[in-house]
Image (tube, grey):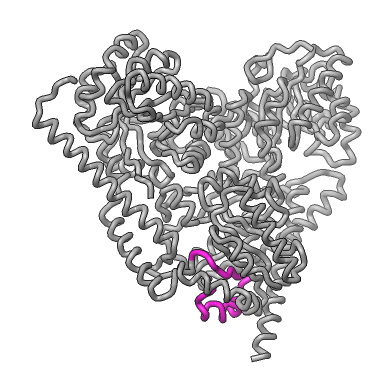
Amino acid sequence: MTDEITEGGAAGAPSKRQSWLIVPPSKRDEIEQAARSGADVLVLDLVELLPDREKSSARNVFRDAIAVAKAAGAEVFAQIDPSSAETDLRACVWPGLAGVVISRAESAAQVGEIGTLLDRLEMERGIAGGTVHLVAALETAQGNHAAHDILHASHRMFGATLGRADLVMDLRPEPSGEIHLMAYLMQRLIIITGTVGVTPLGAWWRAPDRGLLATPENTYNAAHRGRAIGFKGAMCLRPEQVEPLNRAFSG
Amino acid sequence: MPVVTARFVDNAWRRSCDFVIIDLEDSVPHHLKAHARTLVKDAIAKVSKGGAEAFVRINHDSMEEDVEASVWPGLKRIRYPKTEHAHEVHRLDALITRYEGARGVEPGTIEIDPSIETALGVANIFEIAAASARIREFGAATGGYDLSRDLGIEMFVDFDQFVYPRGEAELAARTLGLGVRTAPFVANTTGSVSDADRALRQAEAARKCGLRLGTGGLNPAVVENHNLGLTPTEEELRDAQWVLEQYRVVEESGAAWKTIGERVIDRYEAARAKELLEWAAACAERNREKAEAVARVKAQA
Amino acid sequence: MSSILIRRSNLLVSMAERGQVENAWRHDADAITLDLESGVPPELKPAARTRVREALQPAARGGAEIFVRVNDSTMSEDLDACVWPGLSGIMVPRVESAADVAEAAEIVTVLERERRLPVGSVSLIAVIESAAGVWHLRSIVAASPRVSQVALDEGDLAASLGIEPLPEYDPFVYARGRVAVEATAARVGAIGMAYPLSVRPREAPGSEIHALATKARNSGMKGVICPYASWVAPVNAAFTPTSELVAWNRRVREAFAAGVAAGTAAVPLEGRMIDVPVDEWAIVVLATAEACAARDAQKSAAKSQASETPSKSQ
């Protein structure tokens, strides 16, 4: 496994990765629409957006979904569930996959397991070793508590995000409009990513924004605030959120 | 409340509190502490007449004597002030175990509540919170004088001075599955402890945030509003029922989520709605318990 | 109670600006830091280094403690140039680990011994400028008993994280809060200004500096590094208990003592509840006020002496 390792972070990420649009892999027309949105990265999701009964069919079409997404010039990541890491990775690690988002990452051991699986699958499927990057979505208290160890656990680690921590941890709006505990979690994450040398992804969402979903205007504002405190790009759920993210994070 | 002030102890049961903290620490003058220890056993019985749980706040520096004075049937929890190290919790745990055994209290029933009141406590918060299975809940710098004094700051200013300590405490509590007494920042520029309106606003803010534990107060005037603020409203309950109905429709349609107008209906909303209904039922049950207890006391009078 | 360190204002002057160095003593700062680091262009650093020894004692004419901010890249040479009589301490920049502190402390110890200075007399101010420094704070503040204060350089921290901060969105509430807690836990003084002047210092009306310095104090800071002389007076005032505060705390002590004598330790006073912690805080405020007064008297005495005797370099 060859790995050109830059200080503390994943190697060879020349492309801009400011807007990340999460889509389910099973609906071709949604993927095509997503690909036209101008998103830098399409995240084909096996965890959050699908009902459980659709997950195995989603895995079956994953390889085609990568091709559709890449055809429009976006990079493609997969979002996997660490509790079904092997199954999910077998479904999504194909040539053309740029990386994997680990939903609800909770431990360095999980990251280690996933790194090992990636080593094997890259070799089996003719992908240059070390190509597939990782992003840790720290969406639980345990994940945030162990953030430093998690982000240090693989040379593949490109970035970290709070993902949908507001939903998973049940963090709700305060009288001020701020989402409870998020200011602390965001700023803490930015310090930890700064310590390890990985890219912090996220936006400073406020009520009524919820679970990475917001109007285009609120998306711009959240990204603008997020950039001002250190984030370098953010994730969203709808194509109309992409242009505001690109605008807020460049220029 | 200070255990040495008889009228407080005798009347606490009337205040419809969920819990009463019998204090041996800061509200008891030094020269009265030995006497105070002799009063705890009876105080436990008196304050719990109205259905409140009886807690005792012991002194940091007289752990053994205070635990000996406090561990009696009816005691639910011991609060340990200015906890700074896990080893303090270990020692307290062992003492409680010893006296539970000696006094016929079922082993393991008495909880430990380590109060974090200094910067060093905040720095060590995770190891403290993880130090004993008796810890189910702890306090996290919600407007505490002691942490302010340790940091050298004047309280009652218009900005949130405790983002870091509160965040550290909440993260530790959530990681370990413990309750944490905290509340969203609501400015308090007067320092009044009897401001019932502010108490209500703060409790309401906590409720809407999904927080369920009262922070406690220093004046009876706030009790009603703590209870009221943390109890869900009728409107919230109706809304929760509606969300659950909508989510059933979502599930039946085979989707993971849908939006209705600006609202998202997904498994997270359904979980929040379900939790709210369970919480409302628990509040009603607790109110009923307290009312029955008060009725029993009055019937005996 | 151990004595309270009063170092409200630390005026930073570049060793490349001779006029500023010569006049620094006039501004009534509790401390002056002679800067060999960011304030001096690289090509002028060697010359600045040669001048620092002779600048130490004249700079103390107004009673200030005298610090030197060294370069981490030329630490040995800089320390060699400045650990001489008249030096109160060293400001060490870009501290990321306990090892960075230990390195400086060891060199200082050797120099103190060689030059017959009381060993341990030179204290350290650790300046944190990176995420790693913020994360490793606990080991940094505990790395040497010489560490008396710790500062967050928010401008450099922002640059290291690629952040261009906006005044409305404070990126460092967590970092600043962590510095305050870990420093206090280690009995070391956290120093720093409130946002946004903490990240982009500038000259401003005294009332604005006073308001922000007060906010810094109420965030756990014990003093402010002043890049401008105009900051010194409002910063000193913000960190000195006002006469109103002193009067209130005297009333607190009286009321509480009366309560204790009457058998209670919870006394209502003017809408607040006075119990043991409130009384103990009153003791701290009154002691701080006394210590400030003593420090101000020291500085006045030094200034009178300086005015009476024509200044001579020692």
Residue A147: x and y, percent?
67, 34
Q: Quadrant of residue C58?
A: top left
Determine whether B138 is above or below C60 in the image: below
In the image, what residue occupies the spot 49% across and 64% down?
Answer: B26
Residue C301: x and y, percent?
16, 38
In the image, what residue occupies the spot 58% across and 36% down?
Answer: A188
Q: Is B14 covered by the magenta stretch?
A: yes
Residue B145: x and y, percent?
46, 57
Q: Quadrant of the C terminus of chain B?
A: bottom right
Q: Quadrant of residue C209?
A: top left
Magenta residues span B3-26
Instruction: Evaluate whether residue B228 shows in this view.
Output: no
Q: Left or right: C85 with respect to C74?
A: left
Instruction: Evaluate whether residue B124 shows in this view.
Output: yes
Q: Left or right: B19 with respect to C112?
A: right
Viewer-closest of B32 and C238: B32
Residue C191: x and y, percent?
40, 37
Viewer-closest of A135 and B111: B111
Determine whether C246 is above or below C87 in the image: below
In the image, what residue occupies the spot 73% across and 68% down?
Answer: B102
In the image, what residue occupies the spot 31% across and 42% down?
Answer: C210
Viewer-closest of A51 and C184: C184
Q: Quadrant of residue C8?
A: top left
Q: Is B116 covered by the magenta stretch?
A: no
Q: Left or right: A92 with respect to B231?
A: right
